[in-house]
């Protein structure tokens, strides 16, 4: 393997100060970066391997190899066993192609959201959800990804957000969310908490049907959310 290091984005670790990053190589040969994304509500922290595996699955790819030099994540054994991952304590070759989650912002968000739902991994719920995060770099999509342990999957909103942060993109503008089988599209409580960590003043557009859309500030979706400067790592 090449000794040239491929860089992911930086971990978001203001509470522990512990950095964590990795790559998952899919059967397509693409590398999917993942970084640790902490949350002030600790159980909602996304590990690097969780971010990378869910990004891979959301792209219709199959996780095969984990590159995570020197880092031992919580629940690492689960992800290795679940997907029979080959684990290499080294960096991937510098010539390996890296998945780029950024695309141009569509003129027809409704159609794109509908098409994205075909990529949702809903082995438990049969309830697809899609999200498009609009950033300063462009649009980043996500779909919900379910794995054998229900709590370790990620919703569409968190897949989009973790893809952005893992790619080093942190300037977020707004987000679109669509759930075709819902009577009223609405982010779950976990997603509200995570979005509130990164974009509380930003708008979320909820696409209930092709013609019915409501818009809300993230902070209004989570009134009295957890905040405390005392939890910040000093």
Image: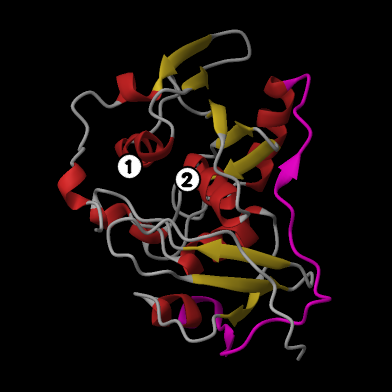
**Residue 160 at x, y percent in the picture:** 56, 44
What residue is shown with label 1?
Answer: 190
Q: Residue at x 70, y 38 (%)?
A: 137
Q: Residues within 10 Å of mark 1 (few under 14, many from 20)?
A: some
Residue 192 placement: quadrant: top left
Magenta extent:
81-108
| Left or right of residue 93, residue 152 in this image | left
- Residue 230 in view (yes/no): yes
Q: Nearer the viewer, residue 60 or 97?
A: 97
Q: Pick the quarter of the image with the N terminus.
A: bottom right
Q: Main secondary structure of the magenta part?
A: loop
**Residue 88 at x, y percent in the picture:** 60, 89
Give the Cα separation between the discs numbered 1 and 2. Answer: 9 Å
Colour pattern of the rendering: secondary structure
Cβ atoms at labels 1 and 2 below 8 Å apart: yes
Q: Nearer the N terminus, badge 1 or badge 2?
A: 2
Membership of 45 in magenta stretch: no
Disc tally is: 2
Q: Residue at x 37, y 64 (%)?
A: 149
| Secondary structure type for disc 1 | helix
| Left or right of residue 69, residue 110 in this image | right
Residue 185 placement: quadrant: top left
What residue is shown with label 2?
Answer: 158
Q: Is residue 205 above or below residue 116?
A: above
Q: Nearer the viewer, residue 98 or 87?
A: 98
Q: Residues within 10 Å of mark 2 (few under 14, many from 20)?
A: many
Q: Pick the quarter of the image with the C terminus.
A: bottom left
Q: Residue at x 41, y 78 (%)?
A: 76
């Amino acid at each position: 393997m090449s000794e040239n290091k491929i860089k992911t984005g930086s971990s978001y670790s203001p509470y522990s100060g512990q950095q964590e990053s990795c790559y998952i190589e899919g059967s397509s040969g693409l590398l999917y970066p993942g970084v640790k994304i902490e949350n002030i509500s600790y159980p909602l922290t996304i590990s690097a391997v969780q971010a990378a595996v869910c990004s891979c699955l959301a792209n219709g790819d199959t996780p095969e190899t984990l590159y995570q030099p020197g880092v031992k994540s919580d629940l690492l054994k689960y992800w290795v066993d679940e997907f029979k991952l080959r684990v290499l304590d080294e960096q991937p070759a510098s010539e390996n192609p890296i998945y780029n989650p950024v695309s141009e912002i569509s003129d027809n968000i409704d159609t794109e959201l509908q098409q994205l739902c075909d990529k949702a991994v809903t082995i438990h719920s049969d309830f697809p959800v899609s999200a498009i995060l609009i950033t300063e770099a462009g649009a980043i999509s996500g779909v919900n990804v379910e794995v054998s342990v229900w709590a370790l999957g990620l919703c569409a909103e968190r897949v989009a957000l973790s893809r952005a942060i893992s790619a080093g993109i942190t300037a977020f503008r707004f987000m679109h969310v669509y759930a075709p089988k819902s009577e009223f599209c609405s982010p779950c409580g976990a997603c509200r908490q995570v979005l509130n960590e990164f974009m509380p003043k930003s708008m979320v557009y909820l696409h209930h049907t092709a013609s019915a859309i409501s818009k809300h500030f993230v902070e209004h979706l989570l009134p009295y959310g957890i905040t405390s400067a005392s939890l910040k790592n000093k």
